Amino acid sequence: MFNNPFSMVVAIVAIVSIASILRARYGLPDRQRSRRAYRDAALPDTAENQQLRDEIKALKDRVAVLERLATDSNSALEREFDKLRQQD
């Protein structure tokens, strides 16, 4: 029955078409529409959400400082360590 690629393509198109017709008829959700609706749903701007946003911003700032300390070889912290090593 599926001797050539053309018949396979026709069969795949027919299966997808029948599935989409059945999905529409029985009211099953479409994956793209449900993802889009979930993504576009705006969360209410409550006090708790604002507090969480502020906390995330503070944590991001702290991580940025820690990254700078870890990667900066001429940091003030490194100089302080060198001073302490020289005192011993």
Image (tube, rainbow, N blue to C red):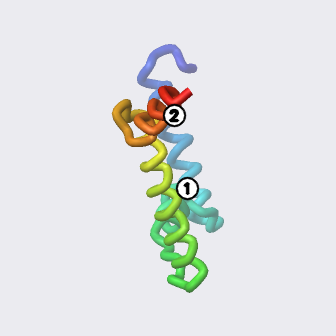
Packing grade of label 2 (10 A; few <14, some 14-19, many >=20) is few
Q: Are marks 2 and 1 in contact (CB under 8 Å)?
A: no
The answer for how far apart the CA atoms under marks 2 and 1 are is: 61 Å
Please state which of the two labelled residues, at mark 2 or mark 1, is closer to the viewer. 2
Quick one: quadrant of the N terminus?
A: top right
What is the secondary structure assignment of the residue under circle 2? Answer: helix
Residue 33 visible (yes or no): no
Which residue is found at the position 61% from the left and 57% from the top? 22
Q: Label 1 amino acid? A: Arg
Q: Is residue 9 left or right of residue 1?
A: left
Q: Position of residue 2 (x, y in %)?
A: 54, 19
Q: Is residue 6 left or right of residue 56?
A: left
Circle 2 residue: 84
Compared to residue 75, the image places residue 49 above or below, namely below
Residue furthest to the top: 3
Which residue is found at the position 47% from the left and 64% from the top? 57
Residue furthest to the left: 74
Q: How many marks?
A: 2
Circle 1 residue: 31
Q: Is residue 76 left or right of residue 60?
A: left
Front one among 30 and 43: 43
Front one among 2 and 60: 60
Q: Label 2 amino acid? A: Leu
Residue 53 visible (yes or no): yes
Q: Position of residue 74 (x, y in %)?
A: 34, 33
